[in-house]
Amino acid sequence: MKVILLNDTRSNQHVGCNLVVQNTLHSCKQVGIEITSTIQNNISDPLAEIQKLTDYNCLLINGEGTMHHDRQLAKAFGKCAEWCKSQNKLVVLYNTVWQENKILNQYLRYFDAIYCRESFSAREIQELGFQAKVVPDMVFSTPMTIGVKGSSEDSVIIILDAVRKGLCYKLGWLAVRKRLRFFSMSNNNDVSINKRFFLPYALRFFSGYTQKLPDSKFIEQISLSDKVISGRFHGTCLALLHFKPTASIASNTHKLEGLYYDIGLEPSIIIQNNKIDWDSIKSQWDACDNAMDLIKTYTSSAPQKILTMFQEIKTLEK
């Protein structure tokens, strides 16, 4: 099977996006799927790019962070799916969120298979009369990093940034007040933070902040931590992958709530509306501690579920 991968999010220079695409390339190679081209998510006209290509029989769309609220990019991907079906190509949507779409729903009929990252998205698609399977986010196929701390080291709490700038700044100031380590997952946030009056200086002085670490170093910091506060979905995924009690702040979709539901955690423990208080953080850490067996079951089974998904995609080839 020869595949075009649409929505190569590595252009975001974001740890989670990098891992999603790297793990996708690795999984495809494992099952004998050849990715002949990738199309980045910052291309203005993805359909025009696809129409230049001929060496493929399947369009594989990474739905990561895109297929919700009838976003313009999501509708552009829908048009790509429609055109590829008109050319008798297979079309697969994977690693996707799906929420509160109207216009985008008309494109569901062009997908030969749909794999959602969590149950809430799959349910929306199923209620529209289409099939959708639930497979954990591609980040969960990342090999676990084993960090070794000195026995005398104090408990380490780290804070991860957020895609929403206001929340990112709020988490930065929380790190300053509590003297906690603060890490950025994206170069874009480094630029934004450095433009804020006094915040970058306070973070460097009180929180040891440096600009975005290489992906492996960032993951190592998670592995060396004891607890995590995360404003990002993929930050939560990486923290849970390493069995860290995590306090997560809600995103602009139900992806975190769906993830918690699938693990067996109560979605209502996720902090809503950027209302960050220490009692809510500690309460969520406690809930994760109490559900650690469920978290381990979910994360340990995820890599095989992801590999099985790609094996199923391979069998679609005629």
Image (cartoon, rainbow, N blue to C red):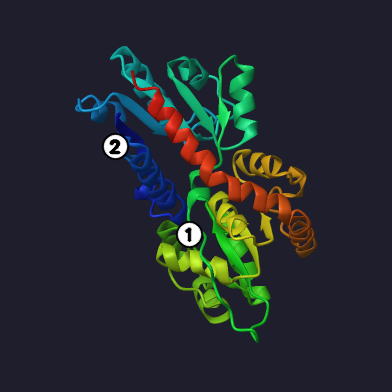
Return the mark for residue 35: 2
Q: Quadrant of residue 278?
A: bottom right
Vertical arrangement, residue 61 with respect to residue 249, above or below: above
Q: Quadrant of residue 129?
A: top right
- Location of residue 248 in the rendering, given as x and y in whole percent from the top left corner: 66, 54
Amino acid at the residue labelled 2: Ile
Return the mark for residue 185: 1
* Residue at x-position 29% and y-position 37%: 35
Q: CA distance from mark 2 to mark 1?
A: 27 Å
* Residue at the outermost bottom position: 152
Vertical arrangement, residue 180 with respect to residue 6, above or below: below
The quarter of the rendered structure image containing the C terminus is: top left
Return the mark for residue 197: none
Vertical arrangement, residue 92 with respect to residue 26, above or below: above
- Location of residue 103 in the rendering, given as x and y in whole percent from the top left corner: 50, 19
Q: Are marks 2 and 1 in contact (CB under 8 Å)?
A: no
Q: Front-most of 271 and 313?
A: 313
Q: Give the secondary structure at mark 1.
A: loop
* Residue at x-position 59% and y-position 30%: 99
* Residue at x-position 30% and y-position 32%: 4
* Residue at x-position 65% and y-position 62%: 244
Left or right of 86 in this view: 93: right
Q: Quadrant of residue 215?
A: bottom left
